[in-house]
Amino acid sequence: MKRILFIFSIIYGLSALSQTPTWSNDVAKLIYGNCTSCHRTGGIAPFALETYEEVSNMAGWLQQAMEDKRMPPWTPDEDYKHFVHERVMAPTEITTFQQWVAAGMPSGNLNIAPPLPVYESGSQLGSPEISLSIPTYTVASASDVYRNFELFVGNSTATNATAIEVVPGNSSIVHHVLVFQDSTSNPINTGGAGGTGSDASQLLYSYVPGSSPYFTPVGTGFRLAPNTRIILQIHYAPGSNGLSDATTVNFKTDNSPLRKIYVNPILNHSNMTNGPLIIPANQVKTFNSEYTTPIKSTVLYAFPHMHLLGKSVKVWSNAPTTNDTTRFVWVPQWDFHWQDNFIFPNSVILPLGSTIQAQAVYDNTTTNPNNPSSPPVLVTAGESTTDEMFLVFFAYMPFSPGDQYLIIDKRISPKGATTFCQGNTVRLEAINGDGYTYQWYLNGAALPGETNYFMEAGTSGDYTVSITLGPNNVVSDPVSLVVNDSPVAQIQTPSSTDIPVGGSVMLSAAAGTGVQYQWYLNGNAIAGANNATFDAPYNGAYTVEVFNGTCYALSDPLLMTGGVTGLEELNTSFEISPNPAQYFLQLRGVLLGKALLYAIRELNGKELHKGSINGMNDQSISLDHIANGTYLLDLIGQQGEVLYRKRFVIAR
């Protein structure tokens, strides 16, 4: 009966273990898919989350941040409007992390954990066709500094920018960057806020902390005139005095005819309905702005902008006649450090005469932890960080029939490493919007059943996805996966899974060439058990790990019964002393009054020394020939059964 209960407890324990999330099997993947793009060495976050140790040390804080929706940083309300490539963890991912923390943050076998993704140190555009950098500029003021930098593209013919990104040379001081195009020879104002000094400058893109590169919808772009120049207006934050920067702007281009996108702050200080923007000290104030559209238009994204007193902002529009509401974005908890172009997964069509509206709340009290003034002071509209703004930029085009079927984004986003070992996978995601249909391909061949906006990929090759919306269809650029072969990790069926009393059963791993082995008992590495075979004296769950020089693989567990309990003391009816010992070990206690054998073993079960004792209550064993370490002392009966076991240490 005892053996039945023991076997049941082992099986139950293995079942529970298999359901408990571990770093290697579950948590590393969700951290790498949601966190390490920022929390990595050289990333914009203040600390790294790349290893088991780094994550487990901050697990309590991370769990709270996930539950509070502070991590990953994503400020828009998820129920108000969805956007392209949202930084949002799925509820199941949060649950997995909670279960992992509750279980004590088990690591699992770290050797089989997925690898950290490889992040590009510079451009996220791959190989941009245009890359322009400002000359190294050293800030010479402790206050806000605005500087316009003139960069010449050198293009003899017109082209279109289909992707834009700004890479700050010094992210600690770059407050924001406005990217303008200007094809005239008008002089620019190198210093000062506001515009560039040239009335012909056209805004293309706005970078603020947290911004992602912007990719234009298929068939659209920002027109770059022949021999144009790019003007970067960079705002350096207070405290930048003496620090240097060399910010870069990158473009992907397309020379074919594309529809032109416009970017403007449609809502601004000039069309506030209860302005001007004056926020008295120790007050919370709400302001509204609205604009009536003079044309039918196709809107691609909204980008609200406030400074440190911002508390919340909501943007929407109402249709003429029906007054139907179209939602754009709601940020209920404004975070100055996480602003972005919030890109709609489907284009938004606004009829002529639509009223675009926004409501912004500002907190100029001492309860606002971001208030730059203590005590609070009167704040008005201005360019300084300590001033305030109420702007909402929109990217839009004059409406064209069929715009409701614009495919906004054709990229594939891997949620993890794209080079890994066999047995792992990476989630590949395409745009997720209304009405889209998908078909995934591997090396040009359709993958049966892979018709969702995402898929789990675990085979080497080039992955693409065909995206269809209405009459439009595009095929994404390929994402290449390299999946390295893992060795075979398998325990061959032994002669018996029931270890005889006092004996052992030889376990053998499947044969491999040029591989290394490590045996485990109940998830713990057995010291010295590094051969293809292991003589198992202990009951429990055995696994074998195999390494081929590139990848590790771990076998399924093999449950062994009988024998003795691994690494556990079997009886306390006798004592050993001293412990730690030096040159001898003294045994005291009832030893059954009969002749017994003793064996000194390493913790992996390897026998080092064997002898006999006479069954008296006091017995001494010499340790002269055994090195320092931790060992097991077994007392063995006449039938070879292990009757007693003690663990001891030799320390000289």
Image: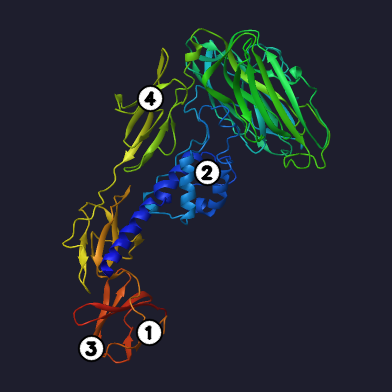
Q: Classify 566 as above or below 39.
A: below
Query: Which residue position is annotated with label 2?
Result: 40
Disc 2/disc 4 C-alpha distance (Å): 29 Å
Badge 4 or badge 3: first in the primary sequence: 4
Q: Amino acid at mark 2?
A: Arg
* Residue linked to disc 4: 465
Q: Secondary structure at mark 4?
A: strand
Tell me the crowding category of disc 3: few under 14, some 14 to 19, or many 20 or more residues within 10 angstroms, Cα based: some
Above/below status of 231 relative to 605: above
* Point 53% across, 8% down: residue: 400
As drawn, is 173 to the left or to the right of 111?
A: right
Is there a contact, CB below 8 Å, between mark 2 and mark 4? Answer: no
Query: Residue 595: which disc?
Result: 3
User: Which one is in front in this view, the residue at disc 1 or the one at disc 4?
Assistant: 1
Q: Callout 1: 10 Å neighbours few (<14), some, many (20+)? A: some
Q: Given the image, on which type of amino acid does mark 1 rest?
A: Glu
Estimate the x, y position of residue 106 in percent, counting from the top left: 43, 55
Question: Counting residues from the N terminus, which is met first, the one under dot 3 or under dot 1?
Answer: 1
Q: Disc 4 vs disc 3: which is toward the camera?
A: 3
Give me the C-alpha separation between circle 3 and circle 1.
18 Å
Which is more toward the observer, 54 or 72?
Answer: 72
Left or right: 298 with respect to 511? Answer: right
Dot 2: within a 10 Å radius of its alpha carbon, few (fewer than 14), some, or many (20 or more) residues?
Answer: many
User: Quick check: marks 1 and 4 in contact, CB under 8 Å?
Assistant: no
Q: Nearer the viewer, residue 545 or 374?
A: 374
Residue 575: mark: 1
Distance of mark 2 from mark 1, alpha carbons? 52 Å
Mark 2 or 1: in front is 1
Residue type pointed to by label 4: Val
Secondary element at tag 2? loop
